[in-house]
Amino acid sequence: MDFTGSLRRSLPAGAIIGLLLAALAGGGTYALWRESVTLGPWTVRTGTLHLEAVKDTPFTCEDADHQLIDSPDAELLPGGVITCTGAVHTALEGRNLHAQLTTDASALPDYLTVTATAVDAAVAIDREGPKPAPAPLPYPVEDDHTYTVTVAITWDKKAALTCDSKEGSGKPVEVCDQTPTETTIPLGAVAILLEQTRPSA
Protein backbone atom coordinates (compact mmCIF):
# COMPACT_ATOMS: atom_id res chain seq x y z
CA MET A 1 0.00 0.00 0.00
CA ASP A 2 1.39 3.43 -0.97
CA PHE A 3 0.87 5.23 2.33
CA THR A 4 2.65 8.37 1.13
CA GLY A 5 0.51 8.54 -2.00
CA SER A 6 -2.65 8.07 0.03
CA LEU A 7 -1.49 10.74 2.47
CA ARG A 8 -0.83 13.17 -0.35
CA ARG A 9 -4.27 12.58 -1.87
CA SER A 10 -6.06 12.97 1.43
CA LEU A 11 -4.13 15.90 2.94
CA PRO A 12 -3.10 19.21 1.44
CA ALA A 13 0.62 20.05 1.16
CA GLY A 14 0.54 22.40 4.14
CA ALA A 15 -0.82 19.67 6.39
CA ILE A 16 1.94 17.25 5.33
CA ILE A 17 4.60 19.84 6.19
CA GLY A 18 2.91 20.39 9.53
CA LEU A 19 3.03 16.67 10.29
CA LEU A 20 6.73 16.51 9.46
CA LEU A 21 7.51 19.49 11.70
CA ALA A 22 5.51 17.91 14.50
CA ALA A 23 7.47 14.67 14.11
CA LEU A 24 10.76 16.52 14.35
CA ALA A 25 9.61 18.45 17.40
CA GLY A 26 8.59 15.20 19.06
CA GLY A 27 12.07 13.72 18.80
CA GLY A 28 11.78 12.03 15.42
CA THR A 29 14.48 12.21 12.77
CA TYR A 30 14.29 13.37 9.22
CA ALA A 31 17.22 12.18 7.10
CA LEU A 32 18.55 14.62 4.52
CA TRP A 33 20.60 13.67 1.48
CA ARG A 34 24.30 13.60 2.18
CA GLU A 35 27.63 12.51 0.71
CA SER A 36 31.01 11.89 2.30
CA VAL A 37 34.67 11.45 1.44
CA THR A 38 37.42 9.81 3.51
CA LEU A 39 40.87 11.09 4.35
CA GLY A 40 42.43 8.48 2.11
CA PRO A 41 43.60 4.88 2.17
CA TRP A 42 46.60 5.58 4.41
CA THR A 43 47.15 4.44 7.99
CA VAL A 44 49.14 6.16 10.72
CA ARG A 45 51.35 3.97 12.88
CA THR A 46 52.10 4.97 16.46
CA GLY A 47 55.74 5.61 17.32
CA THR A 48 57.67 3.75 20.00
CA LEU A 49 60.34 4.45 22.58
CA HIS A 50 62.78 1.76 23.62
CA LEU A 51 65.43 1.82 26.34
CA GLU A 52 67.69 -1.03 27.34
CA ALA A 53 70.85 -1.53 29.37
CA VAL A 54 73.93 -2.33 27.31
CA LYS A 55 75.00 -5.86 28.16
CA ASP A 56 78.70 -5.15 27.57
CA THR A 57 78.57 -2.18 29.97
CA PRO A 58 76.23 -3.14 32.84
CA PHE A 59 75.68 -0.83 35.77
CA THR A 60 78.31 -1.16 38.48
CA CYS A 61 78.26 0.65 41.81
CA GLU A 62 81.04 1.72 44.16
CA ASP A 63 81.34 3.58 47.43
CA ALA A 64 83.22 6.80 48.17
CA ASP A 65 86.46 4.81 48.51
CA HIS A 66 85.95 3.36 45.00
CA GLN A 67 85.29 -0.06 46.46
CA LEU A 68 83.04 -2.08 44.18
CA ILE A 69 79.66 -2.92 45.68
CA ASP A 70 79.20 -6.53 44.68
CA SER A 71 77.68 -8.15 47.76
CA PRO A 72 74.71 -7.65 50.09
CA ASP A 73 77.17 -6.76 52.88
CA ALA A 74 77.96 -3.31 51.45
CA GLU A 75 76.98 -0.45 53.74
CA LEU A 76 76.00 3.17 53.28
CA LEU A 77 76.48 5.44 56.30
CA PRO A 78 75.15 8.95 56.92
CA GLY A 79 77.12 11.38 54.77
CA GLY A 80 78.20 8.59 52.42
CA VAL A 81 77.63 8.24 48.71
CA ILE A 82 77.22 5.35 46.27
CA THR A 83 77.98 5.98 42.60
CA CYS A 84 76.62 3.72 39.87
CA THR A 85 77.71 3.93 36.23
CA GLY A 86 76.47 2.06 33.20
CA ALA A 87 75.37 2.42 29.59
CA VAL A 88 71.91 2.52 28.06
CA HIS A 89 70.83 2.36 24.44
CA THR A 90 67.92 4.41 23.11
CA ALA A 91 65.68 3.80 20.12
CA LEU A 92 63.13 6.38 18.97
CA GLU A 93 60.82 5.12 16.24
CA GLY A 94 58.55 7.80 14.85
CA ARG A 95 58.66 10.98 12.81
CA ASN A 96 59.71 14.05 14.82
CA LEU A 97 59.88 11.97 17.99
CA HIS A 98 61.88 13.63 20.76
CA ALA A 99 62.79 12.10 24.12
CA GLN A 100 64.97 12.52 27.18
CA LEU A 101 66.55 10.42 29.90
CA THR A 102 65.27 11.05 33.43
CA THR A 103 65.45 9.30 36.79
CA ASP A 104 62.81 8.10 39.23
CA ALA A 105 63.95 7.60 42.81
CA SER A 106 60.57 8.10 44.47
CA ALA A 107 60.80 4.65 46.09
CA LEU A 108 63.90 5.60 48.10
CA PRO A 109 63.72 6.97 51.66
CA ASP A 110 63.56 10.76 52.03
CA TYR A 111 67.02 11.03 53.57
CA LEU A 112 68.61 9.79 50.33
CA THR A 113 69.15 12.17 47.43
CA VAL A 114 69.82 11.12 43.85
CA THR A 115 71.69 13.07 41.18
CA ALA A 116 72.33 11.73 37.70
CA THR A 117 74.30 12.72 34.61
CA ALA A 118 74.59 11.38 31.09
CA VAL A 119 76.92 11.74 28.10
CA ASP A 120 76.85 10.38 24.57
CA ALA A 121 79.12 7.35 24.81
CA ALA A 122 80.15 7.41 21.15
CA VAL A 123 81.15 11.08 21.27
CA ALA A 124 83.01 10.59 24.53
CA ILE A 125 85.08 7.77 23.01
CA ASP A 126 85.62 8.88 19.40
CA ARG A 127 86.01 12.60 19.81
CA GLU A 128 89.54 13.95 19.65
CA GLY A 129 90.65 16.57 22.12
CA PRO A 130 88.63 17.51 25.20
CA LYS A 131 85.90 15.04 26.01
CA PRO A 132 82.35 16.31 26.49
CA ALA A 133 81.41 16.75 30.10
CA PRO A 134 78.45 14.73 31.42
CA ALA A 135 75.29 16.82 31.74
CA PRO A 136 72.61 16.46 34.40
CA LEU A 137 69.39 14.62 33.68
CA PRO A 138 66.92 15.30 32.09
CA TYR A 139 69.19 14.65 29.11
CA PRO A 140 67.93 14.87 25.48
CA VAL A 141 68.68 11.76 23.45
CA GLU A 142 68.64 10.65 19.83
CA ASP A 143 67.62 7.50 18.00
CA ASP A 144 70.00 4.53 18.01
CA HIS A 145 72.48 6.05 20.46
CA THR A 146 74.31 4.77 23.52
CA TYR A 147 74.69 6.96 26.57
CA THR A 148 76.81 6.56 29.68
CA VAL A 149 74.71 7.31 32.76
CA THR A 150 76.11 7.99 36.22
CA VAL A 151 73.84 8.01 39.27
CA ALA A 152 74.99 9.19 42.71
CA ILE A 153 72.97 8.21 45.79
CA THR A 154 73.86 10.34 48.80
CA TRP A 155 72.79 9.88 52.40
CA ASP A 156 72.24 13.39 53.70
CA LYS A 157 73.92 13.39 57.10
CA LYS A 158 71.67 16.13 58.45
CA ALA A 159 68.55 14.39 57.17
CA ALA A 160 69.61 11.26 59.03
CA LEU A 161 69.22 13.01 62.38
CA THR A 162 66.10 14.08 64.24
CA CYS A 163 66.80 16.97 66.55
CA ASP A 164 64.62 18.45 69.29
CA SER A 165 65.24 21.44 71.48
CA LYS A 166 65.00 20.54 75.18
CA GLU A 167 65.48 22.53 78.36
CA GLY A 168 68.69 21.80 80.20
CA SER A 169 70.99 23.76 82.55
CA GLY A 170 68.83 26.85 82.22
CA LYS A 171 69.00 27.06 78.38
CA PRO A 172 67.65 25.05 75.45
CA VAL A 173 69.80 22.12 74.38
CA GLU A 174 69.52 20.50 70.97
CA VAL A 175 69.32 16.73 71.29
CA CYS A 176 69.67 14.66 68.12
CA ASP A 177 68.82 11.03 67.56
CA GLN A 178 69.58 9.00 64.46
CA THR A 179 66.57 8.53 62.25
CA PRO A 180 65.49 4.88 62.08
CA THR A 181 66.53 3.48 58.72
CA GLU A 182 65.76 0.50 56.59
CA THR A 183 68.00 -2.52 56.95
CA THR A 184 68.68 -2.46 53.21
CA ILE A 185 68.62 0.15 50.45
CA PRO A 186 67.53 -1.44 47.16
CA LEU A 187 69.55 0.14 44.37
CA GLY A 188 66.99 -1.28 41.99
CA ALA A 189 64.54 1.28 43.36
CA VAL A 190 66.31 3.89 41.22
CA ALA A 191 65.07 3.76 37.63
CA ILE A 192 66.40 5.36 34.47
CA LEU A 193 63.47 6.47 32.31
CA LEU A 194 63.09 7.39 28.65
CA GLU A 195 60.31 9.92 28.25
CA GLN A 196 58.87 11.64 25.22
CA THR A 197 59.20 15.41 25.10
CA ARG A 198 57.52 18.09 23.05
CA PRO A 199 59.72 19.57 20.33
CA SER A 200 60.66 23.20 20.95
CA ALA A 201 58.76 25.73 18.89
Image (cartoon, rainbow, N blue to C red):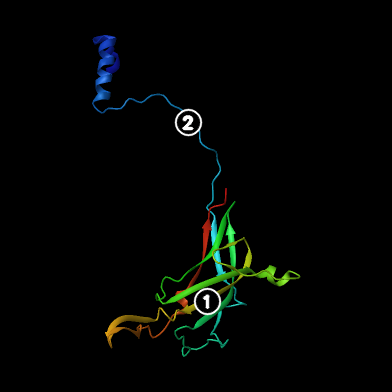
**Residue 184 in picture, x, y percent from top left:** 41, 84
Residue 173 marker:
none
Residue located beneath label 1 in the image:
152
Q: Amino acid at mark 2?
A: Ser
Residue located beneath label 2 in the image:
36
Relative placement, left or right, of 126 versus 195 is right
- The nearer-to-camera label among 1 and 2 is 1
Are the two marked residues, 1 and 2, in contact with CB atoms closer than 8 angstroms? no
Is residue 1 among what the camera can see? Answer: no
Q: Residue at x 53, y 37 (%)?
A: 39
Is the residue marked by circle 2 packed among few (<14), some (14-19), or many (20+) residues within 10 Å? few
Is the residue marked by circle 1 packed among few (<14), some (14-19), or many (20+) residues within 10 Å? some
Q: Quadrant of the N terminus?
A: top left
Where residue 3 sits, quadrant-wise, is top left
Q: Nearer the viewer, residue 66 or 78?
A: 78
Q: Amino acid at mark 1?
A: Ala
Q: Residue at x 56, y 69 (%)?
A: 52
**Residue 74 in picture, x, y percent from top left:** 48, 88
